[in-house]
């Protein structure tokens, strides 16, 4: 029997607001008052710096210049510096590792599996690069992953470039990976792709990989 998972599809949400929602949802899962959850959304332009001690070293412009391009947040997730913006499908799974083996590395690999399977639906051959986190198309990175675990519950998650303005990445060394080039699904396919279309494709793969049944936050969905 699959576990229940609340599905929040909430459109364009400022980063700080999404962070507060994640924390509320995480507390409800940790306290056992609500099922696990997946938040699917996109953000206005924002740079986030993870807890890597070298994150600031991977800015190619001053912090003042960076802040003039987009909001800047320092956050508690793993990983380095990255960009979120319109046209990027962001997923914040709030999953209970107390019942999922407490293996963070295995959890991250499952997120990668979901993203690879989703891209396969669009005829894109994606995969991993040994020693690196995320999903790649050839030598270019198409999806980033950075997670945080609090009280054995996950937050933060993945960002899949669908039709993202890739020029924002020119101000940073994405994920702290020297020479990293970012790409998007629209760029790979040479055509526009709708974010909702990609979200629709991703959901059954997420349900299969994590063994969940999605419900509306207010109750079971149809």
Image (cartoon, rainbow, N blue to C red):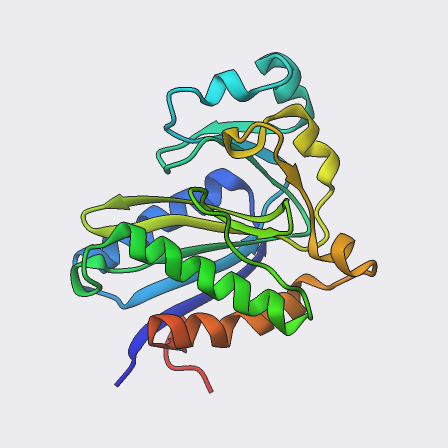
Identity of the residue drawn at 50% across and 53% down = 128
Vertical relation: 60 (above or below) 213: above
**How far across and how far down the image is residue 94, in percent?**
34, 57
On the question of residue 215 being in view, the answer is: no
Looking at the rendering, which quadrant does residue 84 occupy? top right
Identity of the residue drawn at 48% across and 51% down = 158
Vertical relation: 13 (above or below) 75: below
Identity of the residue drawn at 59% across and 59% down = 126
In the rendered view of the protein, which quadrant contains the N terminus? bottom left
Looking at the rendering, which quadrant does residue 100 occupy? bottom left
- Left or right of residue 29, residue 192 in this image: right
**Nearer-the-camera pick, 165 or 118:** 118
**Nearer-the-camera pick, 101 or 50:** 101
**How far across and how far down the image is residue 35, in percent?**
27, 68
**Nearer-the-camera pick, 63 or 15:** 63
Q: Looking at this rendering, what residue extends furthest in the front direction?
A: 130
Q: How many marks?
A: 0
- Left or right of residue 143, residue 55 in this image: left
On the question of residue 48 being in view, the answer is: yes
**How far across and how far down the image is residue 219, in percent?**
37, 78
**How far across and how far down the image is residue 31, in percent?**
16, 57
Looking at the rendering, which quadrant does residue 36 occupy? bottom left
Identity of the residue drawn at 46% across and 31% down = 80
């Amino acid at each position: 029997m699959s576990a229940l998972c609340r599905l929040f599809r909430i459109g364009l949400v400022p980063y700080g607001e999404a962070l507060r929602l994640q924390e509320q949802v995480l507390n409800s899962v940790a306290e056992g008052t609500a099922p696990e959850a997946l938040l699917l959304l996109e953000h206005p332009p924002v740079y986030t710096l993870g807890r890597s001690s070298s994150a600031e070293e991977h800015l190619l412009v001053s912090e003042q210049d960076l802040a003039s391009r987009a909001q800047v947040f320092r956050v508690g997730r793993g990983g380095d510096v990255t960009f979120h913006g319109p046209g990027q499908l962001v997923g914040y799974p709030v999953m209970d590792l107390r019942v999922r083996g407490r293996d963070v590395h295995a959890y991250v690999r499952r997120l990668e599996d979901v993203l690879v399977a989703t891209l396969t639906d669009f005829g894109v051959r994606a995969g991993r690069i040994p020693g690196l986190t995320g999903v790649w198309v050839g030598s270019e990175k198409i999806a980033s992953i950075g997670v945080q675990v609090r009280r054995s519950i996950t937050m933060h998650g993945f960002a899949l470039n669908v039709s993202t303005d890739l020029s924002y990445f020119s101000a940073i060394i994405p994920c702290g990976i020297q020479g990293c080039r970012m790409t998007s699904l629209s760029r790979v396919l040479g055509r526009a792709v709708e974010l909702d279309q990609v979200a629709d494709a991703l959901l059954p793969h997420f349900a299969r990989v994590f063994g969940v049944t999605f419900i509306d936050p207010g109750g079971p969905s149809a």
